[in-house]
Amino acid sequence: MEEKEKEIVLAAIGVFMRLGIKSVSMDDISRQLGISKKTLYKYVSDKNDLVSKGVQLMKDAEEETICGIQALKMNAIDENMEIMKYVTGLLNNLHPSVMFDLEKYHPEVSRSMIECRHDNIYECVMANLKRGVKEGLYRRNLNADVIAKIYIHSTDVILDQTELHIEGISFSEKFKEYFRYHIRGIASEKGIEYLKEKYSKS
């Protein structure tokens, strides 16, 4: 993807995240970006193509960020907390209708995104759990495979407004509360003490 195309697609995704997908037309995108429709259609064939390219760029950016966090070689709890901060930051900027719009009006893009996200989350959670057990911060008797799959299912539910709609509670707030529940459930006594010492106000 050339630089100009990437710039346009990322800017358009920013609009979708703020306003939703269904309610935003290609005319709206060109106006919001300050470009002509001719320029917009030079890089994308239609709205679905724009959404598809945008989702791919977001997936790439997320993978790069997570890999960057993992490369810092923090302990398992600190790594988990950094990932939580990153994810809640993303969710803070997500319009409530985005996931619903994506699933209903761009189903193939949605399926591809979910499959990729599930694979990435599974690998990330499994690696973190194994290291946390090795470091003595997580329970030795935990079943990593089961916990990773529960984590995936739980994040799906959090992002589904039809499954878990709580009036006045944002995606990021729901995720943050679930994450606290998750980290305390997997932590050993040593891990709980570490959480209390370092993250008592988180």
Image (cartoon, grey):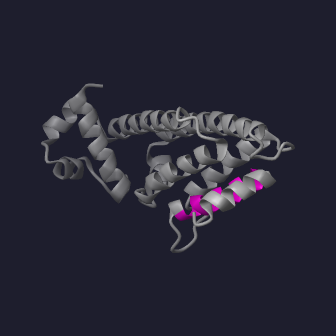
Q: Position of residue 100 (x, y in %)?
A: 49, 54
The reply to whether the magenta stretch includes residue 175 is yes
Q: Residue furthest top?
A: 2
- Verify whether residue 46 appears in magenta: no
Q: x, y percentage for residue 104?
A: 49, 49
- Residue 170 visible somewhere in the drawing: yes
Q: Residue at image x 58%, y 51%?
A: 81
Residue 163 visible here: no
Indicate the quadrant where residue 173 lies: bottom right
Which secondary structure class fits the magenta region best?
helix
Is residue 124 or residue 68 the one in the foreground?
Answer: 68
Q: How many marks?
A: 0
Which residue extends farthest front? Answer: 197
Residue at 51% x, 74% y: name it: 168
- Give how far across and how far down residue 91 sits, in percent: 47, 55
Image point 67% across, 57% down: which residue? Answer: 195
Q: Is residue 33 left or right of residue 44?
A: left
Whether residue 84 sits left or right of residue 128 in the image: it is left
Quarter containing the N terminus? top left
Above or below residue 34? Residue 176 is: below
Which quarter of the rendered picture does the C terminus lie within?
bottom right
Residue pushed farthest bottom?
Answer: 167
In the image, the segment drawn in magenta is 173-187
Q: Is residue 181 above or below residue 110?
A: below
